């Protein structure tokens, strides 16, 4: 496994952890304030980063 693959795998792991820790926070926010008053960036950004890291991992 070359260095680029290791870097993208590490990025993917951290993004997955951020996604998993953000899900309960979003769920609590939806329960408290409703669907439209929640900051989805806590889950959306790690999800996009995870997808991008997966694409870059496969390319390298």
Image (cartoon, rainbow, N blue to C red):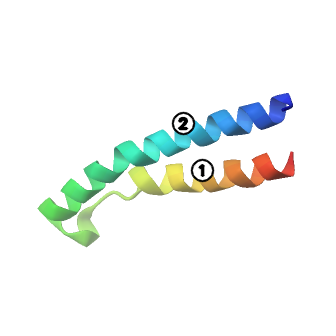
Tell me residue 20's x, y (percent). Answer: 40, 46
Q: Quadrant of the C terminus?
A: top right
Q: Under tag 2, what secondary structure?
A: helix
Residue 50: mark: 1
Residue 17 in percent (x, y) is at 46, 40
Residue extending farthest left: 32
Along the line of sight, the residue nearer the viewer: 33 or 50: 50
Mark 2 Cα-neighbour bin, 10 Å: few <14, some 14–19, many ≥20: some
Relative to residue 15, is residue 35 drawn left or right? left
Q: Is residue 10 above or below residue 53?
A: above
Image quadrant of residue 33? bottom left
Query: Which of the labelled discs sits on residue 14, or is there none?
Result: 2
Q: Residue at x 63, y 37 (%)?
A: 11
- 25 to the left or right of 15: left
Residue 49, relative to residue 32: is it above or below? above
Question: Earlier along the polypeptide chain: callout 1 or callout 2?
Answer: 2
| Closest to the observer, 57 or 48 | 57
In x, y percent, where is residue 53?
69, 47
Residue found at x 45% / y 41%: 18
Please report the residue visible at 68 percent of the width from the left and 38 percent of the height from the top.
Answer: 9
Residue 42: x, y in percent?
Answer: 40, 50
Q: Helix or strand or loop: what does disc 1 sit on?
A: helix
Quadrant of res 27 = bottom left
Tell me the residue at 21%/63% (across/down). Answer: 30
Mark linked to residue 28: none
The answer for how far apart the CA atoms under marks 1 and 2 are is 8 Å
């Amino acid at each position: 496994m070359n260095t680029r693959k290791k870097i993208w795998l590490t990025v993917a792991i951290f993004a997955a952890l951020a996604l998993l820790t953000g899900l309960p926070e979003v769920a609590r926010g939806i329960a408290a304030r409703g669907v439209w008053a929640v900051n989805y960036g806590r889950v959306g950004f790690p999800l996009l980063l995870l997808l991008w890291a997966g694409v870059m991992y496969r390319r390298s």
